[in-house]
Amino acid sequence: MADTVSTGPAPSARRRRPSRVQLVAAGAAGLAALVLVLILTAGGGSGSAHARRGARAATASAAAGATATGSARGATAASGAGAAHRAASPSTSPSGHRVEVADPEEAHSFPAPNSARRKSAAAPTKAGQAIVAAGAPSDAEVREELAQMEAVERAARRKAKLRLQAVPGGGSIGGNGTIPIPTGVPEAVQRVIAGANAIADFPYVFGGGHGSFVDSAYDCSGSVSYALAAGGLLGAPVTSGELEHWGAPGPGRYITVFANAGHTYMYVDGVRYDTSGRSGIFASRWQVAARDNSGFVARHPPGL
């Protein structure tokens, strides 16, 4: 086997070149040792304690210099990031107040002198309430609209109250013989009232409205049948006796029909519709006062 020729020390045995920081630190330590020897040689005697203190101070100074030199490189490497952080973060003034740093985009923000300041803006919470949504009315506008609507409703109630007053000679309401159609009831009930209004002042003729819903006079059951048909609750005229078994038993929430073999009438939204008790031949079938329901069967349309 041929001898192996070594061209240099093994990688693990190579000596690392001392860094500049290490050279500076070694030089400072040597200088401190030299100073200590000179002081001890020259001082002697009672001044030895003073000399030792001076030597320790010199050694500490040299070590501090070496440490500062070693830290310089790290400080230089971190200076870029530190400067960027300081530029982006506010600092603290001697009085303890946070000081805002300069805006790097100020030149592109159209800076103006203090003389160009405007009147102070409103608080953010108040400014945010100015527009809830695009096109939405303000609170004041909503309150005004509600007040107008309530005024209209009050006027309608006053008008309805006047119209539900009986005319002399009986219990029929005055005016044109019709009652207002309420808005807070089911549509079927509204249609019943509208149908009843349509023939409210027609004359009474026995058997009227039974050959057809379309007639020129109506009796009690013909009148009730016409109104119920207007609400989609009947398909053909029925007699009073038939209404005794119509619909569901008992009073209803909006409509209650009272019937026996000879007569029928009904209450619609609390107002009586009846041919008995009218104030005249062409007076309204809508009656102001209630009547004794004894001897009559109460029926109502299911759900109403």
Image: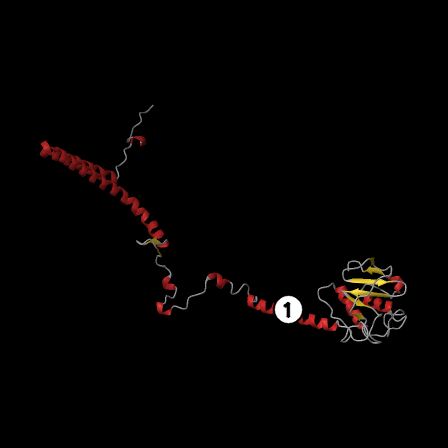
Assign the N terminus to one quadrant of the image: top left
- Judged from the image, the secondary structure of the residue bearing numbered disc 1 is helix
Q: In this orientation, which residue lies closer to the viewer: 280 or 87?
A: 280
Number of marks in the rendered image: 1
Q: Hey, which residue is sitting farthest top in the picture?
A: 1
Q: Quadrant of residue 149?
A: bottom right
Residue 138 seen anywhere in this rendered image of the structure: no
Q: In this orientation, which residue lies closer to the viewer: 278 or 89?
A: 278
Q: Is residue 197 above or below residue 61?
A: below
| Mark 1 lies on residue | 150
Residue type, label 1: Glu
Residue 197: x, y in percent? Answer: 79, 71
Assign the C terminus to one quadrant of the image: bottom right
Residue 26: x, y in percent? Answer: 21, 37
Q: Quadrant of residue 107?
A: bottom left
Residue 151 seen anywhere in this rendered image of the structure: yes
The residue drawn where x is 64% and y is 71% is: 151
Q: Quadrant of residue 88?
A: bottom left
Residue 264: x, y in percent? Answer: 86, 65
How busy is the neighbourhood of tag 1: few (under 14 within 10 Å), some, or many (20 plus)? few
Residue 35: x, y in percent? Answer: 14, 36
The residue drawn where x is 66% and y is 70% is: 154
Q: In this orientation, which residue lies closer to the viewer: 72 or 51?
A: 51
Q: How is the image coloured?
A: secondary structure
**For this view, does 60 lie left or right of residue 181?**
left
